[in-house]
Amino acid sequence: MTLALARVTTGTAQTPETQNQAAGSAPAIDSLRGLLHQKQPDSVRYHRLQALSQALFAENEPEARRVGEQAVQLARHRRDWPGAADALYQLVVNCERAADYVAAMQYSQEGVEVAQAHQLPDEWRFTQCLALVSVDTKDVANGLKFMQQAYRQQAAAGNVSPRERGGLLLNLANTFLLMQR
């Protein structure tokens, strides 16, 4: 019997134009690409890049990753550290879903560094991703270590939703159960 770990992701803010776009549909992707060619404030461009990256990931992973990295770079250029963290987190989640564990680990580590350097409260999200990828790659001992670290980080962070708290606790319990096997 295999235990499936619960993966709790947080949403990325979107502009009204991209809010109702269906991820992965050709019209949505074409629409988002068209919107990116318009003159727009950097904050709007960032959200559109995020939406396009998410929409592309299921059908064109390399392009989705390039677009996601553009969102990270734009956020860094703007010194929007929470935005950079959100873009990195989206890349982590999408790479993990695509079973690209090396990239997921790299983006997770980069996210930890951004969160630490800019004292962001969501460092725990990246540490939890390090744990999940460790478990996915059969390194359950490190997975448990990272999961416990994420639990401590989350406890110190404010404004964590009950869903996120519950998801982390479920992942911690499941990782512990895997260690017992």
Image (cartoon, rainbow, N blue to C red):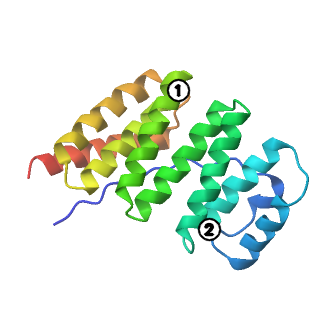
Is the residue under label 1 in contact with that under label 2 (CB below 8 Å)?
no
Q: Residue at x 43, y 62 (%)?
A: 97
Image spot of residue 107 (x, y percent): 46, 45
Q: What separation in Å lies between label 2 and label 1 (alpha carbons)?
A: 28 Å
| Above-or-below relation of 181 to 88 | below
Sequence-earlier tag: 2 or 1: 2
Q: Image quadrant of residue 109? A: top left
Image spot of residue 37 (x, y percent): 85, 61
Q: Residue at x 35, y 26 (%)?
A: 152
Q: In screen coordinates, is 130 left or right of 159?
A: left
Q: Residue at x 75, y 64 (%)?
A: 20
Q: Secondary structure at mark 1?
A: loop
Q: Secondary structure at mark 2?
A: helix
Residue beneath label 1, please? 121
In this orientation, which residue lies closer to the viewer: 135 or 61?
61
Q: Name the amino acid, label 1.
A: Pro
Image spot of residue 127 (x, y percent): 38, 37
Q: In screen coordinates, is 106 left or right of 10?
A: left
Q: How many marks?
A: 2
Q: Name the amino acid, label 2.
A: Leu
Q: Residue furthest bottom?
A: 26
Residue 161 tag number: none
Residue beneath label 2, please? 56
| Above-or-below relation of 174 to 97 | above
Assess disc 1: are there few (<14), some (14-19) or many (≥20) residues with their C-alpha within 10 Å of its C-alpha.
some
Image spot of residue 68 (x, y percent): 61, 53
Q: Nearer the viewer, mark 2 or mark 1?
A: 2
| Quarter of the image where the N terminus is located | bottom left
Q: In screen coordinates, is 19 left or right of 61?
A: right
